[in-house]
Amino acid sequence: MTTKINEAHRFRPHQLDMPPRLLLGPGPSNAHPRVLQAIAMRQVGHLDPCFLEVMSEIQELLRYLFQTDNELTIPISGTGSAAMEASLANIIEPGDVVLVGIIGYFGQRIADMAGRYRADVRLVETEWGQVLDLETLRAAMEEHRPTVLALVHGETSSGARQPIEGIGDLCREYDCLLLVDTVASLGGVPFFTDDWKVDIVYSGSQKCLSCPPGVSPLTFGPRAVEKLNNRKTTVANWYLDLTLLTKYWGISRVYHHTAPINLNYALREALTLVAEEGLAERWARHQEMAELLWQGLDQIGLACHVEPDLRLPSLTTVLVPEGVDAKEVAGRLLNEYNIEIAGGFGPLAGKVWRVGLMGFNSRRENVVLLLEALKEVLG
Ligand SMILES: Cc1ncc(COP(=O)(O)O)c(C=O)c1O
């Protein structure tokens, strides 16, 4: 061998040992111990009959989570943004008018992605912390006559919860599909895909499901599937093409890409935990813990950015008091207490902290710990 091996980048790092952080930011949340155990389970092949059974179980448990009977209900390999991209890539044909509700940053991301799939993107906007009411949406539907209306249920950048009830009927009146992002809400905040007539819903694993990031729930209802099946153009994203993915997740079990086996074990366990607890109990727990946090914040003189009726239980935006350096406080919580919270960004940069009580982390002891730590840091 004449070419010499370049040893410049060769080194032996020490054994990985991460600090025991309590993840109370906008996500990820700490994975449940049972989920972490499941991820370490020995692998089988992605077409092994045992894995095929796991896949079917995941699909059925996802239907419970989404509250849907939709056949096309699968986890996308990738984070929440991959599920967002899968939704848009499959439903948009070039020139389709897509109306995006912007109540914070993630609506903007949807609009950006939709534009890349050559949609004619229109926006209906409000301030970060507010939500869009039915009248505003009706006026926007009347003006733009979209093929798809895209909304964010739990806006992680602002801490607002967009009401969805009634919008499904509005969309049907205008022969439009309703697409909803539930990355920060599903599994922690009430959501009824079928009853609310939502055609496309996606989420993520690392927030209210307390599973590591990397597999993201997605469901397409019959109206969305009909549009998908009648496309005039092929889906412009091969990896996320549902016409191909459904052959692997459907009866024929045809290889598309190698499923992230162990992440799917983790998701199965996370979904099992949801089924064991029950959705009603889980939603009530998230609401109760959020209210405990809001009361505690009030007691130490801190206010919330979003008015009570519009607050997202899984993510609270806390107003930073005058003269306090938001970054310094978050840094001290991390370094001195091992607690992660996040700052605001965009119009809320420096103005709020973002506190998540998601999934397994939505527990009384975490609320008390955070409030005590905040009290100490703020003096
Ligand atoms: C509302 C919302 N949508 C989409 C995403 C994107 O998900 P991911 O970061 O997992 O790609 C996030 C992540 O924070 C989110 O909060």
Image (cartoon, rainbow, N blue to C red):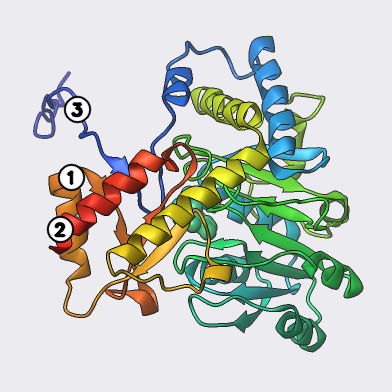
Mark 1: which secondary structure?
helix
The residue depicted at 76 percent of the width and 51 percent of the height is: 193
The residue depicted at 51 percent of the width and 82 percent of the height is: 127
Whether residue 112 is visible: no
Q: Between tags 1 and 3, which lies in front? A: 1
| Mark 1 within 8 Å of ligand 1, using the beta carbon | no
42 with respect to 239 (left or right): left
Q: Position of residue 194 (x, y in %)?
A: 82, 50
Q: What residue type is labelled 1?
A: Tyr
Q: Where is residue 12 in the image (x, y as percent from the top left)?
A: 12, 24
The residue depicted at 25 percent of the width and 75 percent of the height is: 321
| Mark 3 within 8 Å of ligand 1, using the beta carbon | no
Q: What residue type is labelled 2?
A: Val
Q: Residues within 10 Å of mark 3 (few under 14, many from 20)?
A: few
Which residue was labeled with disc 3?
A: 17
Which residue was labeled with disc 1?
A: 337
Which residue was labeled with disc 2?
A: 377
Question: The N terminus appears in which quarter of the rendering?
Answer: top left
Question: Looking at the image, which is closer to me, 373 or 36?
Answer: 373
| Mark 2 within 8 Å of ligand 1, using the beta carbon | no
The residue depicted at 42 percent of the width and 40 percent of the height is: 363
Q: Residues within 10 Å of mark 1 (few under 14, many from 20)?
A: some
Mark 3: which secondary structure?
loop
- Label 1 close to label 2 by CB (< 8 Å): yes
Q: Where is residue 312 in the image (x, y as percent from the top left)?
A: 53, 61
- Report the Cα–Cα distance between label 1 and label 3: 17 Å
Mark 2: which secondary structure?
helix
* Mark nearer the N terminus (3 vs 2): 3
- Report the Cα–Cα distance between label 3 and label 2: 26 Å
Q: Position of residue 150 (x, y in %)?
A: 68, 67
